[in-house]
Image (spheres, rainbow, N blue to C red):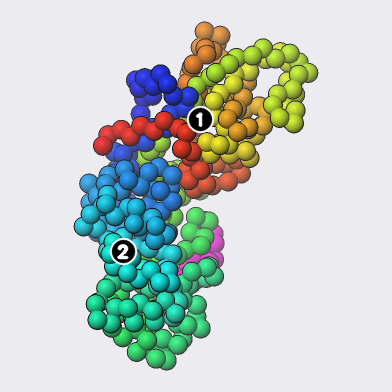
Amino acid sequence: MALSNIIIAHANAVLVIDLAAIRKNYQILQHTLNGVEVAAVVKANAYGLGADRIGPALVKAGCKKFFVAHLEEGIHLRPYVADTEIHILGGLLPGASNTYREYSLIPVLGSLNEISSWADYTRDIPLPCDIHVDTGMLRLGLPQSELNQIVENPNIMAGLKVLNVISHLASADELHSYQTSAQLRAFKVARKALPMGKACLANSSGIFCGTPYHLDMVRPGIALYGANPTPNFQNPMCPTTELKARITQIRDARAGETIGYGATYKVNKNSKIATVSVGYADGYLRSLSNKAFAYLEGYKIPLVGRVSMDLITFDISNVPIGLCNIGAWVELIGPNHSVDDLAREGSTISYEVLTNLGARYHRIYINE
């Protein structure tokens, strides 16, 4: 992804998304899983990168099943991934059953009320669904009390065309978490009450917890987009995004002067300060203020001062003067500085960084 080869005269900032790398990540997971089916989570507009482009790229890689969070996301995605399954993790919206049918969307049912509503709606027109079991997150999914009711009265499930029984791991990215194995045990118990369909538990990090978590199908999200699903080890995935922005001004700052809103950074020696045209309106998080780094022609430069709506400032004093030019591209995410690096500097996670990438970036999709 050599941005130097892409000339965008009118763009202040450019986000390059490598569709070949996303396809490669899907194939890496397929290889890791030795035949277990790999669905793809493309919720939140494919984690901010564009579901309308990511979806077709994954279809080319062989993906036939997609998961999104909201019904509206499924409606939006449908034209781009024809002849695939789209599953709605958010469940069955009251009064919207006809919409699921119209767009061939599969609700992930997470309560007895949802199960009853879908069973009533599909009594004469069998339509597929998934069942979500809560194994310890206390968010979506059948709680143990409702699962017990199914055990006592299996007829609750009569007539339902269940494709998958799923749950979700809460701590799979934490190396020594007791919760992950406890959730697997709870899911196996739940499968005795709900033996129909395929079993699906592992998210991106869960895939790397080992074979017992793979079951019949997995549904990775963040791993497809290049972030590290194994934060305690080297990233097994390919980077997929590069974010660069132009220098708009270069200022000489004297020792004792302050930079940006609130005067939170005081210059301790004469310095060169570059203003770059990205800010929190573009999803460059305010929590990165005085913490983040970037790269200018391979030189690491610190962010100084607060992140404002449209602008950030870097100390470029260590960069050779001949490389410090108005219009030069500063690498915010790229080969030298991964999305995980930026997330760490902002005291957050790569999910938040990617899903906040703003609409003002000029987006370039390569390797379609």
Question: Judging from the image, what secondary structure is the residue with disc 1 in?
Answer: strand
* Crowd tier of the residue under label 2, counting other residues whose Cα lies within 10 Å: few below 14, some 14–19, many 20 or above: many
Name the residue rendered at 46%, 37% in the picture: 359
Amino acid at dot 2:
Leu
Looking at numbered disc 1 in the image, what kind of residue is underneath it?
Leu
State the image coordinates of residue 207 (x, y, percent, origin top left): 39, 57
Percent of width and height locating residue 235: 43, 43
Q: Residue at x 55, y 41 (%)?
A: 343
Asked if residue 311 is positioned above or below residue 9 in the image, the reply reads below
Q: Which mark is residue 105?
A: 2
Which circle marks residue 332 in the picture? 1
Q: Residue furthest right?
A: 256
Q: Position of residue 147 (x, y in %)?
A: 45, 82
Quadrant position of residue 266: top right
Identify the image quadrant of the N terminus: top left
Which disc is residue 354 wearing? none
Q: Is residue 319 above or below residue 285?
A: above
Q: Secondary structure at mark 2?
A: strand
Mark 2 or mark 1, which has the lower sequence index?
2
**Image: magenta residue range:** 175-184
Q: Which is more foreground, mark 2 or mark 1?
A: 2
What whole-number distance in Å separates the C-alpha atoms at marks 2 and 1? 37 Å
Which image quarter holds the C terminus?
Answer: top left
Res 49 visible: yes
